Image (cartoon, helix red, strand yellow):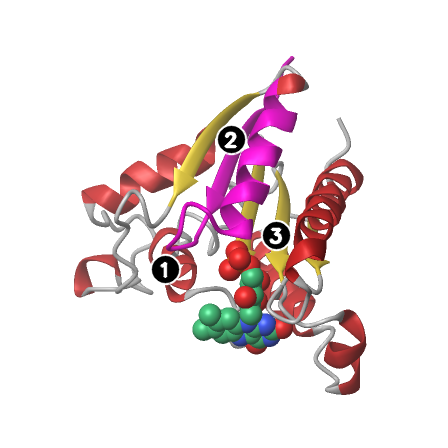
Amino acid sequence: MPRHTLLVHAHPRTDSLTAQVATLLHARLKDEGGTVDVLDLYAEGFDPVLHPADEPDWENREKAYSPEVHAHMDRILAADDIVIVFPVWWMAPPAVLKGWIDRVWNYGFAYGRSKPRLASKRMLWLALMGSPLEDIEKLGLDTVLETQLRLGVSEYCGITDSAVRVVYGTELSGVPKDLRPERVRQLLEDAGAALEEALPR
Ligand SMILES: Cc1cc2nc3c(=O)[nH]c(=O)nc-3n(C[C@H](O)[C@H](O)[C@H](O)COP(=O)(O)O)c2cc1C
């Protein structure tokens, strides 16, 4: 049975490394015979601000949220695998992606049920980090994303087959211009390897 993947990405520029990684993963997933729903949060104009319509009602896990949120919930439900590609901004996902989690991964849908609805899915958070790993380790920040995203979101929602993978050193401004194409090639290869390792076919 071919797998269906929801491929979410979040970057304001279509020529970003993030967008290139998303394009590569899209191609890989299709080459493997799967189907892919691409959710480009910027291109779709997703509103990350949580308004009262999408605020959880802790006394009603059947609450009807906004139609936009229910449409996104349906896209999540349809997926076997969820892959999220994003640049790390202040050691966290960009606001548009954080807002997608805030609004869509809502009470009664993603969590708050004795039988979690999303538990059978697989999930990969693929983060692009400007700094090299050594710098992040020196700051004691190398487990931040794992804690926040895998434990704080995926596992909290019952998705035990989940992983955070980080492609480090994506900030190219310090790399001589003539060496950048090779560095980009290497970073894309790292991203492809992370997909294969985290979500084996
Ligand atoms: C607002 C902002 C915040 C950032 N914060 C971090 C950070 O906390 N740690 C880090 O290593 N890089 C940080 N960066 C660098 C990005 O991670 C890096 O530019 C990005 O991964 C490169 O991929 P892109 O070409 O797709 O943007 C930040 C960049 C921006 C624009």
**Contact, CB < 8 Å: mark 1 with mark 2?**
no
Q: Which residue is mark 3?
A: 125
Amino acid at dot 2: Ala
Q: Which residues are magenta?
A: 1-30
Q: Is residue 111 left or right of residue 56?
A: right
In the picture, measured across the screen, residue 118 lies left or right of residue 200, that is left
Q: Give how far apart the Cα atoms at labels 3 and 1 are.
A: 15 Å
Point out residue 105 in the picture as x, y percentages from the top left corner: 42, 53
Residue at horizontal 45%, vertical 37%? 76
Name the mark on residue 96.
Answer: 1
**Residue 201: x percent and y percent?**
75, 26
Q: Position of residue 51 (x, y in %)?
A: 20, 64
SS category of the residue bearing label 2:
loop
Front residue of 185/117: it is: 185
Residue 51 seen in the figure: yes
Quadrant of ligand 1 in image: bottom right
Q: Residue at x 72, y 53 (%)?
A: 183
Residue count near mark 2 (Cα–Cα under 10 Å), binned few <14, some 14–19, many ≥20: many
| Residue 77: in magenta span | no
Mark with earlier residue (3, 2): 2
Count the marks: 3
> SS at mark 3?
strand
75 w.r.t. 140: above or below: above
Query: Is disc 1's CB within 8 Å of ligand 1?
Result: no
